[in-house]
């Protein structure tokens, strides 16, 4: 039986993307603007964390996609092998009623196996999505706290803030 081609390692294809370079470029751009009361370093650090979280979530989702594709390839190989064995079993079954009974038995087994495979793939996809979502949700919560802290610092540093205390 012919061997299925191996799924390409797309992580090698994505190796040139560097979130640190992206964050550094953002930092350089922000430092060109002198905004009163804005802590540019905190803003840049926050954006760096955002990019890192997004990159981590994408990596998890991507690795999940690779695992699903690899498993689908394995399932396809197993299916071809089982189909070949099933055809052999049906042809050796004997009389037409025996062949029909064997065919029904094999069809039932194939259906149950297909359901099991679909369940397995759905669980793999769900797990990858859950991990990626958890990473993003965690970063969003942190980001909201950072925005709140920056806003409070800006309020405290604003002219007349000392008089309001």
Image (cartoon, helix red, strand yellow):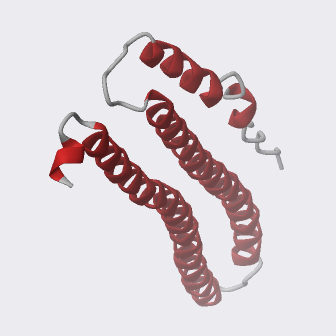
| Residue 36 location (% of width, % of height) | 31, 23
Left or right relative to 40: residue 92 = right
- Quarter of the rendering containing residue 13: top right
Say which of 161 and 140 sits in front.
161
Residue at the image position 63 percent from the left and 83 percent from the top: 99
Q: Please count the marks in the image.
A: 0
Q: What residue is drawn where x is 78% and y is 41%?
A: 6
Quarter holding residue 40: top left
| 69 in relation to 121, above or below | above
| Residue at image location 58% in from the left, 78% down from the top | 116
Residue 4 found in image quarter: top right
Q: Nearer the viewer, residue 152 or 31?
A: 152
Report the residue that reaches farthest toward the top: 32
Residue 22, image x and y in percent?
A: 56, 22
Residue 47 image point, x, y percent = 47, 36
Quick one: 21 or 42, which is closer to the camera? 42
Q: Residue furthest front?
A: 163
Q: Does residue 24 lie above or below 134 as drawn?
A: above
Q: Nearer the viewer, residue 106 or 24?
A: 24
In this picture, residue 23 sits left or right of residue 82: left
Give residue 108's position: percent from left, percent from top.
55, 84
């Amino acid at each position: 039986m012919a061997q299925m081609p191996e799924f390409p390692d797309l992580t090698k294809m994505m190796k040139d993307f560097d979130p640190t370079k992206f964050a550094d470029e953002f930092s350089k751009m922000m430092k060109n603007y002198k905004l009163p009361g804005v802590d540019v370093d905190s803003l840049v650090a926050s954006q760096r964390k955002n990019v890192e979280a997004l990159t981590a979530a994408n990596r998890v989702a991507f690795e999940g996609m690779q695992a699903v594709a690899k498993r689908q390839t394995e399932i396809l190989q197993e299916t071809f092998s089982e189909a070949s064995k099933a055809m052999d079993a049906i042809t050796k079954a004997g009389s037409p009623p025996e062949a029909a009974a064997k065919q029904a038995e094999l069809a039932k087994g194939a259906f149950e196996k297909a359901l099991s495979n679909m369940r397995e793939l759905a669980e793999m996809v769900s797990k990858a999505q859950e991990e990626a979502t958890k990473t993003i949700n965690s970063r969003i919560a942190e980001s909201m706290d950072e925005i709140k802290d920056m806003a409070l610092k800006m309020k405290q540093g604003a002219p007349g803030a000392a008089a309001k205390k």
